[in-house]
Image (tube, grey):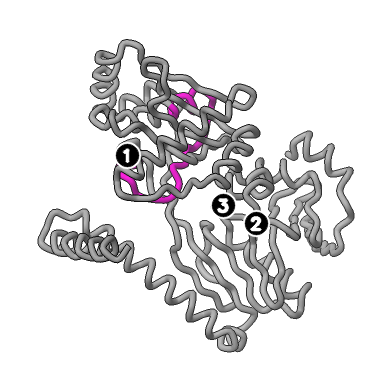
Amino acid sequence: MRSEQEQTVEKKSSNPIAVSIAPWSNVSIQCYDKDVPPFVGAALERLYGNLFSSLAYYRIFGGADQASVYVVREGKNVVCAWLFRRHHNSVRVINEGIRIDQDDVIRFTNYIFATYPTVNVISFHAVRPQMVELPMPYQRFNCLEDMVLTLPSSADSYTSSLGYIHRYLNKLKRDFPSFSFRVLTPGAIDESQIRRIVDLNHLRMASKGKESINDENTTQRIIQLASECGMIGVVMLDGRICAGSINYRVGDNYFLETLAHDPAYDDYRIGTLCCYLTICECIARGGNEYHFLWGQDEYKSRLLGVQRDLDDLVIYRSYLHMVLYGKLAMQHAVHAAIRQARMWVRSTRRRNNVGGKMVNALWRMVRGIRQAKS
């Protein structure tokens, strides 16, 4: 069923420029060219519940300028809504992080190639294709991983799966009787709280000899998005924020933006504890999934995050066009090979054997050379 919001705002939408109705079924396709009707935001949240397939994210962080919308309905119900951009001879689907089924991919590909005769390449980035084969030539390769925790029905059930967590939490409470954990949502979130967490992130990265990716421009956008769909968890010690997590809620799912803590409290695993307490709050609020997002950091697996692979998918109009766009196809093949090599290095470094020790030694040497040059 469509939400009441979808049904209400759709009345204000512009008319689609192209309509294709299958006469043998109640399935219809509509395409809004360089226009995102108001009903699309609610439809995206209901269908996908993913931060990287939400209008709020694209409005604030960019990426959907001049976007068109492809909509599939069964009767009156929206069952598929993909944002895309056309550029010369290609179409790029903007939705990311979502599951895409084989039938939907085939229907979309056939529609785009039939509607836009000059388009010869269609690409998806960081999606979860659920398919066996396509009737047209394509490339598919892993590009990212999303560490995801399917939230249990109760915080007690989750805590019972983490045998170590009480030890760290009790030690922190014992040494700091002023300990408290607070959760803030839109309306109660203050810019200074976000900036404190971002500053802790900078401090944490500096202690590792790294530079935080959260510059002032990014911080401003985080503040804006958090004011709409944010949920912040902070650990307070002696009245100061010593650890914090910035998260976003989309539908029933939560997405971790930044987790940071004061390195002075490393021995207490205060960052992990902050994330754990945040997850417990998500469970209490009826959440479905908690997304740690990319990066195979140890704390994510310790908190029971499970790797969910995200792939790039590139589809060509024909094998002839795959040859004609050989440079593009080769670039994708090279990116896939580099990704596989990095994953192999990462997994090998974790092994406590001769191969792992050799790769770690080589890795330290390369880092030393890079630091010397910088």
Residue tagged by mark 2?
63
Which type of secondary structure does the marked residue at label 3 adopt? Answer: loop
Which marked residue is nearer to the observer: mark 1 or mark 3? 1
Residue type at mark 3?
Answer: Ile
Q: Nearer the viewer, residue 207 or 98?
A: 207
Q: Magenta span has 299?
A: yes
Instruction: Give residue 60's position: percent from left, percent from top.
Output: 65, 46
Which residue corresponds to mark 3?
A: 98
Name the mark on residue 237. Answer: none
Which callout, 1 or 3, points at the residue further toward the start of the chain?
3
Q: Earlier in the sequence, mark 2 or mark 1?
A: 2
What is the three-letter code of the residue carrying label 2? Gly
Residue 206 placed where, x, y %?
A: 34, 44
Which residue corresponds to the image point at 40% horizontal and 35% vertical from the top-left?
200
Pointers 2 and 1 in contact (CB under 8 A)?
no
Residue 217 visible in rendering: yes
Sooner in the amino-acid sequence: mark 2 or mark 3: 2
Left or right side of 154 for 121: right
Q: Which mark is residue 299?
A: 1
Question: Which of 216 and 115 lies nearest the eye of the viewer?
Answer: 216
Q: Which portion, as a residue range, is magenta?
A: 278-300
